[in-house]
């Protein structure tokens, strides 16, 4: 009867899936003790898988009993991660087995042999500080020291306390969420942190240290769109990749964006009645205003026109005429050249051509060229007639 009671106690909170057929699987359980060797009750043992991108998937969890024991049920053969956390923060979150290096836990392999983990907790440390902007406290900012520790929010005075941190070095981050401030690694925001100094690591064992943050406003690229005379342009669209803003009557735009260090994107501007333009910006213009000058379209420098067509009957002795549409600009001079099956017809250089016996059973086309000083000439060719017939 005692054995039955023990089994029931171990299975509290374990799903029926965890009690599946044990073929090709093993069970996972264990006991947790404090640093003095006493049973650690009411802690949470969680079994994870972690993929290559460090994304965790919870497989099972169990709360330790008064004797410190926990049970995570039968699990398929594979690699797993086991973490024990203390909701009160008195003990530091502890991975099993003990990690061989900093920052990342070690996996253990489950085979058909069962695993009984013996885990010793260590007292958690508390760290405190304040979060400010321009020296003034900022409330409701999440402060985190890693994914295994609860993240508190700052109070009205900007103060916070993170509980249950293990001794050693940690990366501390203040996350203000959506709003006017940017997420900041301790101690302050630097646009180029990823390539220059890196976030500073804190030592949780440093007694009496206040770990204070100074937030920065959300970085942006902004400025004014003006015409060549310096007048603002309203309704212009300015884009940085997929982020866009439209200027108001004052021509001002602003795009909130965190530019990585040594990154040189281009602002692209479009405005009705103006040429599309762009301006390359870089880290030295981070949070700076820039002026985009929109230019009026340049007058065309090419002759324009449409392909000619041929009127008249395709019969020997008939006269064909080249018909042209609107060619421009004004003053363009047109010249003509007729072809028989793609070969120039000698002397046929006028707008009309009389078909001869040499054109019988051939197809005729006309090429029109427009020329004007200072412009690139344009040549267009008509569609061919049907085969020229006898009378």
Image (spheres, rainbow, N blue to C red):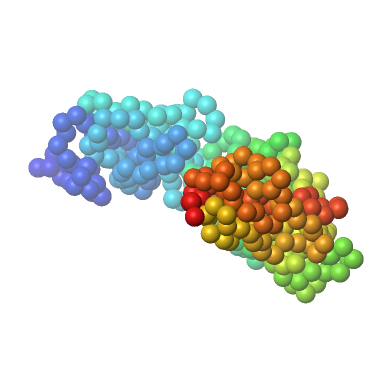
The residue sitting at the right extreme is 229
Q: Residue at x 79, y 69 (%)?
A: 233
The quarter of the displayed image where residue 294 is located = bottom right
Q: Toward the viewer: 308 or 137?
A: 308
- Residue 334 drawn at (x, y percent): 75, 56
Give the percent coordinates (x, y) of residue 285: 80, 50
Residue at figure coordinates x 54%, y 30% from the top left: 102
What residue is at 57 percent from the left and 43 percent from the top?
Answer: 358
Image location (x, y in percent) of residue 179? 64, 63
Q: Nearer the viewer, residue 223 or 300?
A: 300
Residue occupying the far bottom of the picture: 249
- Residues 185 and 117: in front is 185
Residue shown at 76%/50% (left/top)?
377
Question: Quick check: 107 left or right of 344?
Answer: left
Q: Is residue 165 left or right of residue 232?
A: left
Q: Is residue 391 above or below residue 41?
A: below
Say left or right for 54 vs 153: left
């Amino acid at each position: 009867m005692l054995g039955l009671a023990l089994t029931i106690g171990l299975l509290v909170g374990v799903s029926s899936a965890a009690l599946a057929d044990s073929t090709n699987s093993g069970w996972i359980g264990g006991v947790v003790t404090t640093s003095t060797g006493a049973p650690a009750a009411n802690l949470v043992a969680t079994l994870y898988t972690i993929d290559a991108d460090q994304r965790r998937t919870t497989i099972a969890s169990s709360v330790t009993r008064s004797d410190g024991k926990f049970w995570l049920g039968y699990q398929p053969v594979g690699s797993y991660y086991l973490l024990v956390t203390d909701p009160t923060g008195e003990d530091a979150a502890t991975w099993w087995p003990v990690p061989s290096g900093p920052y990342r836990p070690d996996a253990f392999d489950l085979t058909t042999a069962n695993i009984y983990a013996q885990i010793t907790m260590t007292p958690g440390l508390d760290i405190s500080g304040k979060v400010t902007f321009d020296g003034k406290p900022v409330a409701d900012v999440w402060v985190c020291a890693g994914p295994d520790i609860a993240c508190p929010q700052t109070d009205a005075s900007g103060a916070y306390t993170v509980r249950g941190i293990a001794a050693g070095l940690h990366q501390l981050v203040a996350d203000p969420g959506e709003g006017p401030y940017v997420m900041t690694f301790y101690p302050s925001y630097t646009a180029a942190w990823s390539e220059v100094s890196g976030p500073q690591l804190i030592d949780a064992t440093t007694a009496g240290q206040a770990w204070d943050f100074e937030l920065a406003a959300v970085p942006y690229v902004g400025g004014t769109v003006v015409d060549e005379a310096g007048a603002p342009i309203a309704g212009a669209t300015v884009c940085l990749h997929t982020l866009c803003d439209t200027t108001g009557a004052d021509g001002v735009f602003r795009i909130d964006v965190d530019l990585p260090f040594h990154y040189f994107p281009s602002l692209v501007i479009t405005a009705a009645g103006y040429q599309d333009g762009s301006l390359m910006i870089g880290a030295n213009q981070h949070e700076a205003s820039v002026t985009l000058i929109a230019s009026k379209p340049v007058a065309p420098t090419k002759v324009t026109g449409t392909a000619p067509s041929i009127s008249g009957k395709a019969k020997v002795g008939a006269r064909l005429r080249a018909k042209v549409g609107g060619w421009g600009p004004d003053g363009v001079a047109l010249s003509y050249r007729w072809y028989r099956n793609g070969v120039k017809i000698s002397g046929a250089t006028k707008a009309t051509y009389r078909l001869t016996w040499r054109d019988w059973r051939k197809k005729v086309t006309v090429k029109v060229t427009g020329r004007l000083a200072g412009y690139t000439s344009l040549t267009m060719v008509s569609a061919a007639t049907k085969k020229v017939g006898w009378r």
